[in-house]
Amino acid sequence: MLKEQEYKINNQDSFELTHIFDCGQCFRWNIEEDESYTGVFKNNVLNVKKENGILYFRGICEGNIEEVVEEYFDLKRDYNQIKEVLSKVDDNLRTSIEYGKGIRILNQDLWETIISFIISANNNIPRIKGIIERLSQKYGNEIEWNNKKYYTFPTARQLENVSAQDFRKLGLGFRDIRLYETTHMVLKNEINLEELHNEKDTLKVREKLLELSGVGPKVADCILLFSTLKRFDTFPIDVWVRRVMNELYIKNEDETKVNKKEIEKIANDKFGNLAGIAQQYLFYWKREA
């Protein structure tokens, strides 16, 4: 039986709840009436609240809450230094950083990130969240906390006997077969997730991810950036990113004619190995502002 734990941090820079949880990187955090957020990750259920600059973490944790929080929220990384470097790129990026200054990129479980972003393809956030919640309720483990039931994201082993039809019943649509195939590729060790962590070359990891069913270039880039793989040199491109990159740098009258290679070249030239973090600031700014 896991016990409730609490932890607080004073004056943590670069940590705004809405910026972190609403920037499109995660799907299992929900806002509460008091504007705190509650989320499930691995075997943890955590509520995060910010008041007068103090961060309060409370919940059920596997292990020490301090270590869990530090690892998941990537607290050892100096975002002030990153923002300082990126702010010098140009005024556009400086403005977007000011807007989303509290963004941090989470260390999300690789398996969960793969499946979540396969589900995200051609989908909207409320629907993605609903599918992931139903998947977890049906096949994950139940955790009770604060008189409420939460469910862990199912492991590949927990999905071993789930058919494509079973996935479809959860509202997955055309993605049902993708989830089924990817689950079995991982179970058969056709893709070794541990080896992906150990491979230094981002392009090689990307090529491996692209072998998974339902993983195209954009989904692969999201997995690289938002999971424990943590490859900041990737630059996921969706409609918002294409739009903002075109408006700021390319200026093509027909945005749909802007190709991915062109955007990637500019991102690489301008933002270098911090391209992924720059992408988050630009994406959040364009979509929210």
Image (tube, rainbow, N blue to C red):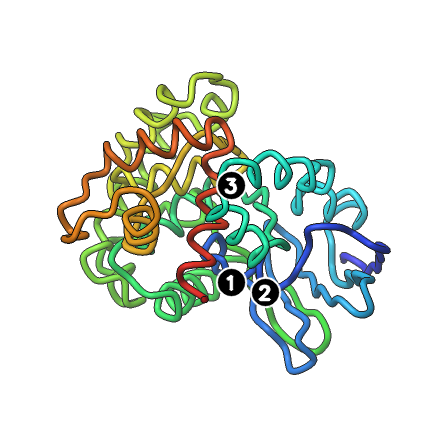
Q: Is residue 195 left or right of residue 12?
A: left
Circle on res. 277: 3
Label 1 SS: loop
- Mark closer to the observer (1, 3): 3
Crowding near the residue tagged with mark 3, few <14, some 14–19, many ≥20 C-alpha atoms within 10 Å: many
Give the residue displayed 61% in from the left and 62% down from the top.
39
Q: Earlier in the sequence, mark 1 or mark 3?
A: 1
Residue topped by disc 2: 18
Which image quadrant for residue 5? bottom right
Q: Is residue 67 above or below residue 139?
A: above
Circle on res. 22: 1
- Say what amino acid the circle numbered 3 marks: Ile
Measured in 3D between alpha carbons, the distance from the residue under mark 2 to the one under mark 1, in whole angstroms, is 5 Å
- Say what amino acid the circle numbered 1 marks: Asp
Give the residue displayed 32% in from the left and 43% down from the top.
249
Say whether marks 2 and 1 touch (CB < 8 Å). yes
Label 3 SS: helix
